[in-house]
Image (cartoon, grey):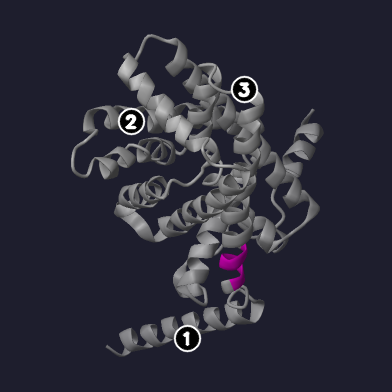
Amino acid sequence: MKPAQSEEQSQQDVDSEEKEQGKEEIEVDEEMLPSRAAAIHEEIRQDGEKELERDGMALLWSAIAAGLSMGASLMAKGIFQVHLSGLPGGFLLENLGYTFGFVIVIMARQQLFTENTVTAVLPVMHKPTRGNFYLLLRLWGFVLLGNLIGTALAALAFDQMPIFDDTTRQAFTAISEKVMENNAGAMFAKAVISGWIIATMVWMFPSAGAAKLLVIVMMTWLVALGDLAHIVVGSVEVLYLVFSGAISWHEFFWPFALPTLLGNITGGTLIFALISHAQIRNDMSDEAKAKTRADAKRKQKDENADQSEA
């Protein structure tokens, strides 16, 4: 039994230069790396490796929880729309409700497609082996499936359970119908920008510190104000129309789900992650890292010498 478990564990291990060299962790100390950008990159890559190596069922359940949590975005936005309609600045405050689901999911460390899935791309770009590509697709599959299950449950509850009054339900419908006013091309284009913004948010986290909550609100509020498309939040909205009988399942998949999914992947993964990786690629060469370590050791040696003289 133990050999089988060991083989299964090895299949879930990310291929990396550090493991080949017998190191347990990725170097994230800024003083030991060529630049601050390289330090941020390595910190995110380390988080990505942890996500890739997580158990599949743990990923699925966390993703389902995230899908349910994202229902808070539609709920808050709908309630705000009802009570802020006609007030000065009502549009701005209404769209602030969109951020609620993101805050819950990210602060609770739940699995969200376009957020956790972006970090997992960096280990693959760093070492694009067949095993790493398998782990990436496995992560994407579990997280996307779980998110869609969770959003479906949230949308079904909003439609079928006696939770909200008729005015709030009408607000949910109006918000959701606005999403479906876009054709497939518009869905894709808006999803590209949305994916880029969410990926930028993830890249800001290592430097955000105590301001992480502000970063989440600021970036996701921008997505709402721009009326952009997000596969998870949008699924709550569009599935609400499906369960209320306003549209068919076919309309959920096209023009919404498939173009939005492809757009989020393109903006958040292919464009942002590729560019972000490219900007530090030369910094992360063996020569550059060796020079940085040598400079750090020389600096430490000089400091020790000064202390000895004192």
Q: Could you say where residue 189 lies in the image, as x and y percent from the top left?
A: 57, 52
Residue that numbered label 1 is attached to: 298
Give the mark nearest the N terminus, 1 or 3.
Answer: 3
Residue that numbered label 2 is attached to: 76
Q: Is residue 111 above or below residue 50?
A: above
Q: Could you say where residue 203 lies in the image, as x and y percent from the top left?
A: 47, 58
Left or right: 131 in relation to 219: right
What amino acid does circle 3 point to? Ser
Q: Is residue 309 above or below residue 182?
A: below
At x 53%, y 80%, the residue is 292
Taking the view exactly as shown, the residue that stands out farthest to the left is 88
At x 79%, y 39%, the residue is 7
Q: Could you say where residue 47 lies in the image, as x and y percent from the top left?
A: 54, 51
Helix, strand or loop at label 3? It is: loop
At x 56%, y 66%, the residue is 276
**Residue 189 visible in the picture:** yes
The residues tagged by marks 1 and 3 sit, at their Cα atoms, a distance apart of 67 Å
Q: Dots 1 and 3: beta carbons under 8 Å?
A: no
Helix, strand or loop at label 2? It is: helix
Disc tally is 3
What amino acid does circle 2 point to? Ala
Q: Dots 1 and 2: beta carbons under 8 Å?
A: no
Left or right: 135 in relation to 80: right
Residue range in magenta is 274-278
Helix, strand or loop at label 1? It is: helix
- Whether residue 188 appears in magenta in the rendering, the answer is no
Residue 248's tag is 3
At x 23%, y 28%, the residue is 83
